[in-house]
Image: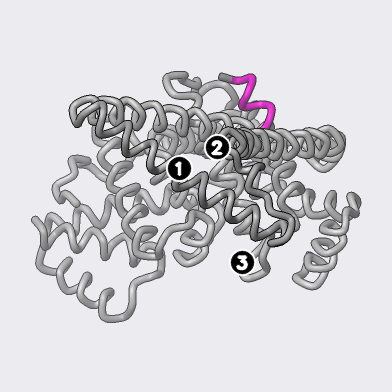
Amino acid sequence: MIQHAEYTMLMSLVLDGEADADEEVRLREHLRGCDDCRQTWQRWRELDRRLLATPAIPAPVDFSALVLAQLDTRVAQERQRRWLIAGLTFAWLGAVVVALVSLALANGWHLQLAPAQGPLAAAWAGLSSTGSWALREISAFLVEIGAPTIAAVTGAALVLACGLAMMWLWVVARVSAGPRALVTE
Amino acid sequence: MNAIQELEWLKLAQRGDRAAFARLVQAYQGPVYNLCYRMLGNSVEAEDATQETFLRVYLKLNTYSQEHKLSSWMLSIASHYCIDRLRRRRGETVSLDEEPVAAALPAHQAGPEETALTAEARDAVRGAVEKLDPAYRVPLILRYWHDLSYQEIADVMGLTVQAVKSRLHRARLQMIEAASTSEAPLGLVAPLGLRHGA
């Protein structure tokens, strides 16, 4: 059977004109000695003949006028879609930045801005101290609540994160597919 | 349209020249419509899909890379759109009698008996193609109605040549198998039972 399956693949290649000379010879030699494959080959050739004999369908209308008539609308929709995706992305990033800056301000980052060291050095010092403060607080909190709670909360957080990520991907996919996809569901 | 003209129209269209884009639409509307029709099985959806394909082509013109043929790139956009549409359609069924293909075909000098047989055979072929899984239907359509090589089909579908070989093989096996059980067989040489599995 496996050997015969190999020959149906060769039949397919020969019909498409994609078999090399060796493959054609191998198929022909096999067909000489195998009645089953010869019968299969006849059916495959007949199928090929019928597919080739079924003509292409001509376009019923000139699509150029129809397409041109919709171009302005689609270009405008496309621009709107890009703005929407950019807006959603910036909103998401903005929320993260606001959360970080709030955390830094809550930890007194602004109090460490020493003008003598320059604004970049002061900002870096403030951010580092905020980071180490956050790590200290998180580790103290984790020790306090214990391993089972950590496992449960981590699991729930992962599920929530996956859910949010999937929602985000769904929204972006819907928006990318254009306004039609948003209304056809 | 020769390759130089096509390139000229393409460059103009990429700069926003709509008349040049209209010429590209006219040049490729036949192959794109034909693919959409074979994929979706009815003229209304095929016309809609053809328009949508060209709108997407226009919006993506600046991303087109000349390492692929323009026709392959357009057919790729059309086939992906049709596959998405078939996925959305899911359980919906489309009648094969919605629009007889014969009505859209050029006049044929044949007697009534021969014409009837030919139309019947065409319907059987069309029905058998429509029953194929879209993953197998696309390469078969591109092979038979667009005369593309394995490499070109691979470019259109984003597959390897080996995968194209395998899908065309599976498509033929499925059609032969379907012919052996269909009420309207393809009329292949009896007996139709498939003896050799893949």
Give the amino acid type for the residue marked by disc 1 in the picture.
Trp
> Given contact means CB atoms under 8 Å apart, are the residues at marks 1 and 2 in contact?
yes
**Magenta stretch bounds:** A177-184
Image quadrant occupied by the C terminus of chain A: top right
- Determine the image quadrant of residue B128: top left
In space, the residues marked 1 and 2 are separated at their CA atoms by: 8 Å
Residue annotated with mark 2: A107
User: SS of the residue at dot 3?
Assistant: loop
Q: Nearer the viewer, mark 3 or mark 2?
A: 2
Residue drawn 36% across the image and 49% down it: A47
Q: Main secondary structure of the magenta part?
A: helix
State the mark number for residue A20.
Answer: none
Depth check, front residue: B194 or B167: B167
Seen in the image, is B102 located left or right of residue A144? Answer: right
Query: Which amino acid lies under the numbered mark 2 shown in the image of this protein?
Result: Asn
Quadrant position of the N terminus of chain A in the picture: bottom left
